Image (tube, helix red, strand yellow):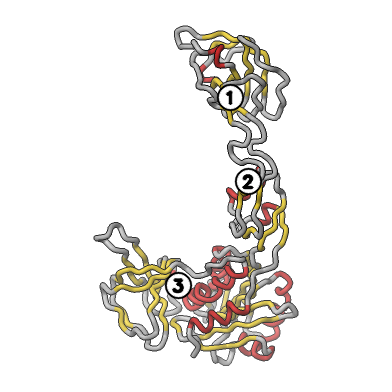
Amino acid sequence: MKSVEEHLTGILERVAPLSPLELQLLDAHGSMLVDEVAATGDLPPFDNSSMDGYAVRLADVADASERYPVVLDVVADIPAGTSPDVALEPGTCARIMTGAPVPEGTEAIVPVEWTDAGMPTVRVRRTPDEGQYIRHRGDDVAAGQTVLDAGTTLNSAQVGLLAAIGRDRIRVRPRPRVVILSTGSELVQPGRPLTAGQIRDSNSYMLTAAAREAGAIAYRVGNVADDPKALIDTIEDQLIRADVVVTTGGVSAGAYDVVKEVLTELGTVDFDKVAMQPGMPQGFGTIGPDDTPIFTLPGNPVSAFVSFEVFVRPALLKMAGVTETARTVVRARCEAAFTSPEGKRQFVRAKYTPAESPAAPATVEPVGGHGSHLIGSLALADALVVVPEDVTEVRRGSTVDVMLL
């Protein structure tokens, strides 16, 4: 059998970051920047008001108070999106809305709440500080300033910043497109009744969600019957929109394991036994004219999930340009005893509790049994206890490695 490291290394050596693309901002959401981005202008691009109120000269409102308000002539009304064509003279002010450019001579903004909101004169009851409620040009970003570094993932705030500095397109490493399908004539889609011998297809839904959580664009094809021609036709039809194909089921040594049967004949996919539990039968290779990577995962839900975490997720992150592809692994005290098969790395579904203090270390507790069909306990887990190949027994209270999901 191959070790987990050997199989993962072989995969990562055969996948490469996707070529950069220039995309519209919203299409680039979730992708990684290829180049650093600098602002071509100031942000904000002009001095503007941060409040609805009145633009004033400080000398005119220096003595304003609740008891003795100052009365000023309102010589202009400045909404956002306009350019003021007045300058403030002594004894005058301008009504101004949030975001509107301040007129020449403005030294502060008096919020409307400090006034009687009057027109054409206004009574000011409080004195602002110099520059108060004025957002100055370049306060946020200065022209020429680097605002995003290469390698930054474009989340919502970064997309907003790019729009604010005027970028409508940006060069990124695109998110990989993943096509996911389950195999098995026994599978039925959720929402449809079961007949004797049938089970519902959960894997294609679970792995589509997992791929999206890894930052990929995932397409769920659904289930394909145990028919070699139907399988190869389905895969070939999907290659036009796939950077990666993921199948589940049909990779063992059974008479109806058509994934292994079909893809072995192509000669470009290797099927191996990997020294791990769950998830021993694994397949990986390429398919189609563009040598699209294909992962063939076991059909049991827990095996499929663990295989995705250990092998597929790192590959997707590498294709997206991420350099650190491994899940965070921490140490924690195990709250239950269990055994582990000799010579295999075991991944045990578990619930992780962070350390509350030095006196209360992080703990982890296995959930459910070891069966690779137990999706109910998988849904309760937020971590995997990783047991090395040479460890056959984990005692209660021992310290273990924990992969955080």
Q: Which residue position holds label 1?
A: 52
| Amino acid type assigned to the residue bearing label 2 in the image | Gln
Q: Residues within 10 Å of mark 2 (few under 14, many from 20)?
A: few
- Residue 115 in the figure: left or right of residue 359: right
Residue hosting label 2: 145
Give residue 276's quadrant in the image.
bottom left
Which mark is first along the chain, 3 or 2?
2
Image point (69%, 88%), residue name: 266
* Disc 1 to disc 3: CB gap under 8 Å: no
Q: How far apart are the alpha carbons under marks 2 and 3?
A: 50 Å
Residue type at numbered disc 3: Ile
The residue drawn where x is 35% and y is 83% is: 340
Q: Secondary structure at mark 1?
A: loop
Instruction: Tell which of 328 and 129 is nearer to you.
Output: 129
Residue 103: numbered disc:
none
For this orientation, the residue located farthest to the left is 359
Q: Name the front one of labels 1 and 3.
A: 1
Q: Earlier in the sequence, mark 1 or mark 3?
A: 1
Q: Secondary structure at mark 3?
A: helix
Residue 353, position as x, y percentages in the image: 34, 62
Mark 2 to mark 1 CA distance (whole Å)? 30 Å
Q: Quadrant of residue 390?
A: bottom left
- Above-or-below relation of 174 to 57: below
Q: Nearer the viewer, mark 2 or mark 1?
A: 2
In the picture, the disc for residue 375 is 3
Count of numbered marks: 3
User: Relative to 365, is 4 above or below?
Assistant: below
